[in-house]
Amino acid sequence: MHRGLIAAEAVLVLGVAKDWLWRQVLSSSFSNWTKVGLAMATTVGMFGGFYLVAQRLMARSVSKTHQVAGSLPVFLPTLLVHGALLFVLFLLYARMLGLHVW
């Protein structure tokens, strides 16, 4: 479950980057054909690259995160940390979409 949460958080962060990049492409002076091609290439490049990087880094990051969490003077349950991170990502998505949730 822990690795699944890390993967979900990483995909959400990647979604933020993708949306920002697409806004830049859409507001550019490129032709619509070029914009669509760039959007497709961006998706393949980001998510394809993410998949390869995530596989390599996930094992290391989980190990390091556990070491850091173990050295904290206060016990923080894993789900609490993930819940906080997902909440911050939720607020970021709301801001990107121009929706007031607070």
Image: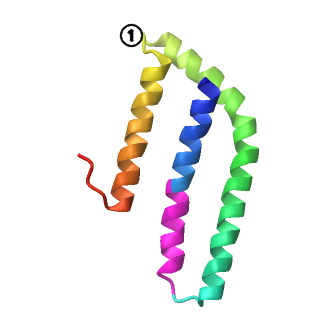
Say if the magenta span includes residue 11.
no
Question: Quadrant of the rendered structure where residue 100 is?
Answer: bottom left
Left/right placement of residue 1 relative to residue 77 reads right
Is residue 2 shown above or below 15?
above
Q: Residues within 10 Å of mark 1 (few under 14, many from 20)?
A: few
* Foreground residue among 25 and 67: 25
Q: Amino acid at mark 1?
A: Val
- Residue at 57%, 31% in the rendered image: 5
Measured as percent of width and height from the top left, residue 41 is found at 70, 69
User: In the picture, which quadrant includes the N terminus?
Assistant: top right
Q: Which residue is mark 1?
A: 74
- Residue at 57%, 42% in the rendered image: 10
Left/right placement of residue 56 relative to residue 9 reads right
Measured as percent of width and height from the top left, residue 36 is found at 63, 79
Is residue 30 shown above or below 69?
below
Left/right placement of residue 12 relative to residue 99 reads right
Is residue 72 shown above or below 43?
above
* Chief SS of the magenta region: helix
Display colour scheme: rainbow
Measured as percent of width and height from the top left, residue 88 is found at 38, 40
Q: Secondary structure at mark 1?
A: loop
Is residue 75 shown above or below 4?
above
Measured as percent of width and height from the top left, residue 67 is found at 57, 16
- Residue at 74%, 38% in the rendered image: 55
User: What is the magenta range?
Assistant: 16-28
